[in-house]
Every structure is written in structure tokens, then in C-alpha cells.
Amino acid sequence: MTRDQAWAIVREFVQSESLRRHMLAVECCVCAYAGKFGEDDEKWGVTALLHDFDWEIHPQAPDHPMKGEAILAERGVSGEIRRAILSHANYSGVPRESLLEKTLFACDELAGFLTACSYVKPGKSIHEVDLGSVKRKLKDKAFARNVSRDDIIGGAAEMGVALDDHIAFCLEAMKAKATELGLEGQRA
């Protein structure tokens, strides 16, 4: 499946602009890791783009992503991509084994958290976010309370990457794509 085909599925199933941007942010981080690891960035990007495509039609566990997986199978999405998407949900029963699966999981919650950190900055820009501010916000349980800190910390550990390095890497990847992610804000 190509990125264009995956994006067409996203546009068909996802109406929420914020959910689309989340999927793009996860794609951004996952593709940056694909480049770092010498992996297939299109396959990794397609996986990241599609990981939450069914959220609006199946917003409850365990329907998401299990029911979505069947739709992707009908659309010809490879078993490797579908498995990675299933594994990003801890309750799916699909263990994360491949580097792609571990990377998708590690980037999912963190991308959302970094986006939230951007929105509370004066200029609402990801360029105002730094490692220190992210670490402080991670300790604030009231901030972005729906984001699982355990998943962020555990995701980095599953990848074998230090948490600080993981945050910094994803932050830089998202800064490089700030305009596309709607996170350019109003830089001074």
C-alpha cells in the first residue's frame, strides 16, 4: 500500500482534523525512526497513518483496532502492517515483536503528548517546546491526563531507547514538519 492509498483511507474514515493531525504526527515520528534504523519509511509511514483510522467508528476498546483490522484486510493492507496496528493496543493480545511494532507503540502516545505541550505554549508552537518542558509536563498528572505516561515510558524501554533521547528525537522530527502538523504556531 502506498502513502497516498493510506491517506485516502484516513480521509474516508476520519473527519476530525485533530485526529488526522495526530495520525500525521505519529507518522512523522515513526518515519524519522525508519530513516534512523534504515527501514522502509513508506511501509512504516503507512502503518502510522492507519493506526487510528477506525477510532471514530470504533471508539471503544476492544473494538478499536480489532474491527478496523478487518476493514484494512478487505482493502489489501498487508498482514505485517495490520499486526503492527493491532499490537499498538495493549489489550489486543498481540505482542509487540518487530521493531516496527515497538516503534509505533513508542511514538503513538508521545506524539499526542508533544502536541499537547505545543498547545499550551504562548505561541502555540512546537518550536517553543524543549526536553525540559516535556519532562516537567510528564510529571503533571493533570496535564493531558488521557495520555498514558506508562505507555510513553514503556514504549521507549521496549525500543531500547533512553526516554530523554526518545522524547528529543520525536520532538525534533515534529519540529521539522511543524507546518504540516499544524504546530508552527506563532513563532517570535
Image (cartoon, helix red, strand yellow):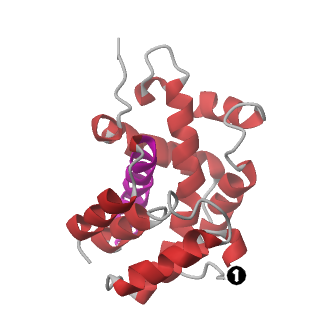
Residue in the picture at 50% in, 29% down: 118
Q: Position of residue 24 (x, y in %)?
A: 37, 51
Q: How many marks?
A: 1
The image quarter containing residue 46 is bottom left
What is the secondary structure assignment of the residue under circle 1?
loop
In magenta stretch: residue 42: no
Q: Which residues are magenta?
A: 18-38
Q: Position of residue 136 (x, y in %)?
A: 70, 29
Q: Nearer the viewer, residue 30 or 88?
A: 88
In the rendered image, which quarter contains the C terminus?
Answer: top left
In the rendered image, which quarter contains the N terminus?
Answer: bottom left
Which residue, given by chain and number where applicable, does mark 1 sit on? Answer: 93
Q: Nearer the viewer, residue 5 or 173?
A: 5
Residue in the picture at 63% in, 54% down: 162
Left or right of 153, for residue 44: left
Q: Quick check: can you spot residue 99?
A: no
Q: Position of residue 149 (x, y in %)?
A: 72, 48
Left or right of 75, for residue 161: right
